Amino acid sequence: MRLGRGPRRWGCWSCAPRRPAPAEAEELHYPQGEHRSDYDREALLGVQEDVDEYVKLGHEEQQKRLQAIIKKIDLDSDGFLTESELSSWIQMSFKHYAMQEAKQQFVEYDKNNDGTVTWDEYNIQMYDRVIDFDENTALDDAEEESFRQVSSCAQSFCFWLLRLYMSYSYFLHLKDKKRFEKANQDLGPGLSLEEFIAFEHPEEVDYMTEFVIQEALEEHDKNGDGFVSLEEFLGDYRRDPTANEDPEWILVEKDRFVNDYDKDNDGRLDPQELLSWVVPNNQGIAQEEALHLIDEMDLNGDKKLSEEEILEDQDLFLTSEATDYGRQLHDDYFYHDEL
């Protein structure tokens, strides 16, 4: 588990629900190596009213809608669902719901209902007031100024910690503002829905890619060479001189650096490799879930699922990422003929 190290994932910068990172999802899904069947439903449905809505569908209607979804997952219409087809479907589902959540947020943030979200409206929704400053202006308001600076002459450790926290809050707020300005492609007074989606989910919009990379380099590329080394990747970590080996989380991070991100094995992350680190990657989670379903439901060992195998263990399929924990059965975007 990352334990606070590594870049802040884009989804965490907003109030939107966050999907767990792959390692975190693994820990929640398989505590002590044991599969939690209830995790699959809880992970997305979460609130009780959504669970209740899922239960309301009768068995026959559940099956009818599930069969419609199975046909859509089966891209080559051969009557079987492969790991690739399941993974592609799950990733599409992730993106669909991320966009739906952004659209819902847009309505909440657009206080005057003029079809745009201004920086002031964003601040009011996030902080209940307008906070606006640049990198150089000294602030008159003592509370806002404390966002910027950590006092070198703090009278107590608690006071210093408070100032440090507020300084970090300023840092995150300033990054939000930069991302907001970059998303505002037409330089209008506020963000349109499409621009707001780019602000909330820059990983989904091509024109935000360079911004994402540059932000990551500014934060992690300490020597300015345009790459992120292993040392820069690990941040401020320093091994305890009395310890015989690194702690487990450092070993995990080193393994990810070498095996997941540093594709050309040159000991550093170039901009494209860096992108795979800082942008949420649902592909791994989707592939893991697809393989999990096949392992659990493939009765004849052919490494794919027939409709009969799925209906044989319908509850497992309905409490998985493949149906977004049953939510797709209540979303006609998924079970109607046209997608």
Image (spheres, helix red, strand yellow):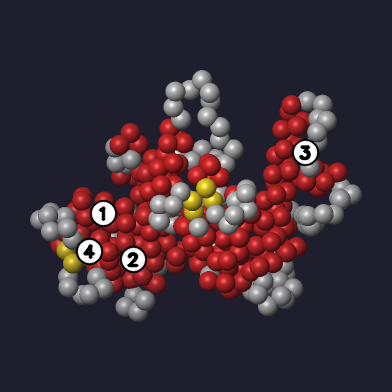
Residue hosting label 3: 150
| Tally of numbered tags | 4
Residue contact at pointers 1 and 2, CB within 8 angstroms = no
Looking at the image, residue 127 sits to the left or right of residue 225; the answer is right
Q: Which numbered marker is on residue 282?
A: none
Residue 168 position by quadrant: top right
Q: Give 301 or 71, whichever is nearer the viewer.
A: 301
The residue under label 2 is which amino acid type?
Trp
Quarter of the image containing the C terminus?
bottom left
SS at mark 3 in the image? loop
The residue under label 1 is which amino acid type?
Leu
Q: Which numbered marker is on residue 291?
A: 1
Q: Give 327 or 280, whichever is nearer the viewer.
A: 280
Q: Position of residue 306 (x, y in %)?
A: 16, 63
Q: Residues within 10 Å of mark 3 (few under 14, many from 20)?
A: some
Looking at the image, residue 54 sits to the left or right of residue 301; the answer is right
Give the CA distance from mark 1 to mark 2: 13 Å
Residue 150 position by quadrant: top right
Residue hosting label 4: 82
Q: Position of residue 217 (x, y in %)?
A: 60, 55
Q: Residues within 10 Å of mark 2 (few under 14, many from 20)?
A: many
